[in-house]
Image: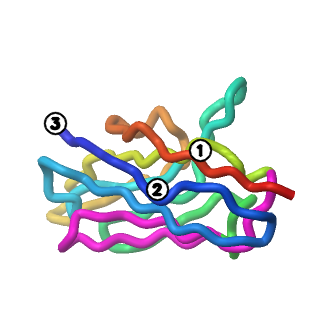
Amino acid sequence: QVQLAESGGGSVQTGGSLKLSCVASSVEASGYCMGWFRQVPGKEREGVAIIGTDNYATYAPSVEGRFTISRDNAKNMVYLEMNNLKPEDAAMYLCAAEPALQLAGKSVCAMSLIPLQYTYWGQGTQVTVSS
């Protein structure tokens, strides 16, 4: 059973920065596709950034160039560095994980931003951005 725990959320002003962290326990995170999602009450959960086992990353268009996802497999950690934050970035940010597919001896991630593609979720960390 994968357990994920996020931290690093907080309140910042428009244009500010935050770095979110997610620690995975009970598993070797290196074998998992990891992602960050966000959700606002009353709205659907949306994908923000995904990182594959090979460190390839994909981003939602709304955060491209402002957010950076990274991972440290030795620490079982995934990070989301958020710069130039906007009020519309305010949300609960959740870490997610999905086992990588094994194809021809390689670990492969679909790199999907669709929440349903991920099995394991953390509880989230709140980000507030004031104008």
Could you tell whether 29 is left or right of 40 in the image?
A: left
Q: Nearer the viewer, residue 5 or 65?
A: 5
Q: Nearer the viewer, residue 90 or 96?
A: 90
Question: Which residue was labeled with disc 3?
Answer: 1
On screen, residue 66 versus residue 52, left or right, reads right
- Name the image quarter holding the C terminus: bottom right
Residue at image coords 30%, 66%? 53
Which residue was labeled with disc 1?
A: 38
Residue drawn at x 65%, y 44% is 91
The percent position of residue 63, horizontal first and vertical second, equals 69, 63
For the record, the magenta segment spans 67-87
Q: Does the magenta stretch include residue 47?
A: no
x and y percentages locating residue 38 in the rendered image: 59, 44
Furthest-top residue in view? 42
Q: Are circles 3 and 2 on residues that touch, CB within 8 Å? A: no
Give, as a three-letter code, the residue at label 3: Gln
User: Are there few (<14), some (14-19), or many (20+) residues within 10 Å of tag 1?
Assistant: many
Q: Does the magenta stretch include residue 74?
A: yes
**Residue visible at 77% across and 64% down?**
13
Q: Residue furthest right?
A: 131
